[in-house]
Amino acid sequence: MTAPNIVSSEENIPSIEPLYLTLLELLDNNLHLSIKEIDTAFQEYQESGYELKRDSLTQEDDISIVIKRFLSDLDSVFDFEFQTKDPEKNGGTDIGVLKKFAKPRHIPLCYIEAKVLPTPITSNKRQETEYVCYRNSKKQGGIERFKTGKHAPQKAKSIMFAYIQKEDFSFWFNKVNSWINEEITSSANSSIEWCSEDLLISEDEFNKEKLGKYHSLHSRSILLSNINITHYWFDFS
């Protein structure tokens, strides 16, 4: 698409709400098509002589990179950046969403955190509950990072992806909410409090093959606003 003049006046910058809704519309209409792109990428790797350890792309970063490229190729006002770093913190999120051709150019509109379900338990440091939180650990899980402000402290909206390798949407919907209910009963992180609003809600009218959509609302510390998370789940099982 042709780059318009860079917006430099703050009063001409659209508010976050319509931009975010435009982003969700883009994801709603296109994310399910990216699943085929995962298979295409794997085939290209094979044809180029890569010695692949598995017979499909299953690792979190491998999938996120392909989805990031797919989204970047769409004709939209958005730019997608793999492993966006927060200059105030050491860590980063899997994909950052920025707006093309406008200032502020280097501040993400929102962040996308990705997780594989079930968690690949490759060492005793990994936990099955990582989509939600870590227990008895200094590390933090996906939703937990948003609640503590480790991710998106200045944002009121963000996104999570789940790459499902086994079972189905219903199984993981119940499993993730069961983990949240356990945190409501007794939070593993004493700095945050969980409540019923943290539970995922299914968007039942959303009907895309091998793509599910969910929502959740999370309270944070008194210094941070609540954050809405839209969850997109990909069925690779």
Image (tube, grey):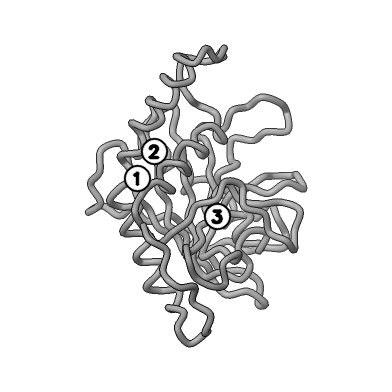
Q: Closer to the N terminus: mark 3 or mark 1?
A: 1
Seen in the picture, residue 94 relative to 12 is either above or below; the reply is above
Identity of the residue drawn at 31% across and 47% down: 30
Kindly identify which residue carries mark 3.
Answer: 96
Identity of the residue drawn at 49% across and 77% down: 7
Residue 115 bears which disc, if any?
Answer: none
Give how far across and how far down residue 9 sits, in percent: 52, 84
Seen in the picture, residue 90 relative to 107 is either above or below; the reply is above
Amino acid type shown at disc 3: Gly
Q: Quadrant of the C terminus?
A: top left
Kindly identify which residue carries mark 1.
Answer: 31
Q: Closer to the N terminus: mark 2 or mark 1?
A: 1
Task: Tell me how far mark 3 sits from mark 1, CA to CA.
Answer: 16 Å
Residue 125 as seen in the image, left or right of residue 33: right
Kindly identify which residue carries mark 2.
Answer: 234
Label 3–label 1 contact, CB within 8 A: no
Single out the mark in the foreground, 3 or 2: 3
Pick the residue in front: 108 or 173: 108
Seen in the picture, residue 194 relative to 171 is either above or below; the reply is below
Q: Closer to the N terminus: mark 3 or mark 2?
A: 3
Amino acid type shown at disc 2: Phe
Amino acid type shown at disc 1: Leu
Identity of the residue drawn at 56% across and 67% down: 105
Pick the residue in front: 102 or 16: 102
Give how far across and how far down residue 17 sits, in percent: 41, 74
Label 2–label 1 contact, CB within 8 A: yes
Q: Quadrant of the N terminus?
A: bottom left
Instruction: Label 1, secondary structure: give it.
Output: helix
